[in-house]
Amino acid sequence: MAAVNPGVYKKVLAVREAYSFDIACLLIRFFGGMLNIGTVTMITLSGYSFFTAGLASSLIALSIFVVAPRVSKRMDERGQGAVIPKAAAITLVGLAIQIGTVLAHGPVWPLFIGSLLVGFYPSPQAMARSRWTYLIRSGRLGEAAPDLRTMFSYESVLDDVAFIFSPSLSIALAAAIVPVAGMVAGGIGFVVGCAVLVASRSTEPEPGWSAASLEAEAGPEAEVEAEGLSDGASAEPAPRKSLLATCAPIRVLFVIYMFMGSFLGLFDTATVSLSEDLNSPDFAGAVLVASGIVSMVMGFVFGMVRLRAPLPKQLVVSACLVGLGFGTMVFVNSAASLMVVALVGAATYAPLLIIANGVCERAVPDARLTEAITWLNAGYTCGAAFGPTTAGAIIDTFGTMASFKVGAVLCLGMPLTAILCYRIVKRGILPSPYTKVEKRDL
């Protein structure tokens, strides 16, 4: 059963405290959306080989996978304002090395060093969602607080906005002005976004915060209630171990996201290859933009729906729908069939991300949400680094259509993981998103 409320976004838009950090994170998202395609475009237009560009892009993805969760862990322990300037500075040094090398047309090895440093890029998706969760669960918004599912849907729409427009913007600037123009523009937006985010102190989550501890600060009655709701919750400010090592639901979501990143990376690469086979290079861009718009609309609509099923069941169903939706790529044999598969798959994509973020929020202590969401994104990045490489090898050996068939097999990984690990997720989170019981510490 489900209830639909078209007016749920009014509460989200009414939270004026969120305007500054959401705008800041949107600017940072745009820079993040440019990192892969923008880097490849900048390097290839400057006369370097596609192999060099691809390797530089893969090193950025590898660095983000290794470094980003640790940067987010530091944010949870010390506060975003204390960590963002340092991480942003390292990222900008890496970007400056890349741009300087390209302008001087120097050797390739500085490009690779720059790529590794760019990977210190802080995750805007995790930072924005953790601030929203802090505002909502801390009780600061009172009765005006929006539903967490609505917030996650709203943030997924912003993710899609950056995904749709930032790659094309970076390519257009690089082609129209100079090869480095796209990444320079992205870097400027990144600096502005980080500065605004650091300045937004009032919405920054307190290190070690939890809903129970903040309720306890309100007075003796709230303290009694918090103790009754708590299951050993603690405001330990400096957790020692990674959530990937200590939280089973995060490991399950990591694997699901890794499969998703792998087959979507393969799908995108195969789409570009098919466009070249059809002598229509613009078709790949049209497919990606159309699928991004569908995903954005579905994320917006899904935020109006309040499902009554427990989150573990929602995760299984949504993972199966994504697997089946993109699994239809096995039938791709023309431009028209590719467009249909892209749109059908995109319609299932946003709900899974929203549900996965909900599972993530219910599975970890409040004070560690930034790290938790970053681990999900790291799983996607890990898969995205594997998918294009696999697709390239298959396309070179067996042709474009064979890569779509391999992608369809990879799609099965998501539903299989969700089904086999259903009980693990169920044990690791609250049985219902509407049951007010405080989460345990990890």
Image (tube, rainbow, N blue to C red):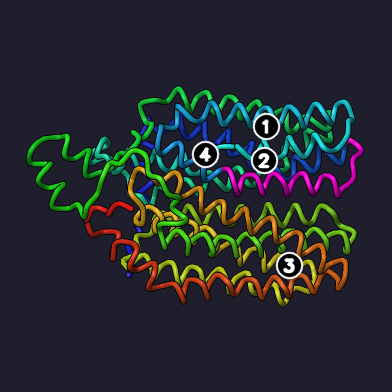
Residue picked out by circle 2: 166
Q: Given the image, on which type of amino acid does mark 4 rest?
A: Val
Badge 1 is on which residue? 186
Disc 4 packing (10 Å; few <14; some 14–19; many ≥20): many
Residue 377 location in percent, x, y? 55, 51
Q: Does residue 180 appear left or right of residue 131 in this picture?
A: right
Question: Which part of the image, by quadrant, shows the N terminus?
Answer: bottom left
- Of the two numbered discs 3 and 4 on the same chain, state the one appearing first in sequence: 4
**Residue 27 position within the rendered picture, expressed as x and y whole percent measured from the top left:** 58, 33
Drawn side of residue 63 relative to residue 58, left or right: left
Magenta extent = 46-67
Nearest to N terminus: mark 4 or mark 1: 4
Residue shown at the point (23%, 41%) measured from the top left: 143
Q: Which SS class for mark 1?
A: helix
Q: Residue at x 62, y 30 (%)?
A: 90
Disc 2 residue crowd, few under 14, some 14–19, many 20+, Cα 10 Å: many
In space, the residues marked 2 and 3 are separated at their CA atoms by: 23 Å
Q: How many marks?
A: 4
Q: Residue 29, image x and y in percent?
A: 58, 39
Report whether residue 100 is seen: yes
Which amino acid, by three-letter code, is at mark 3?
Answer: Leu
Label 2 amino acid? Answer: Ser
> According to the image, label 4 marks what residue?
71
* Secondary structure found at label 2: helix
* Tag 3 and tag 4, C-beta contact below 8 Å: no
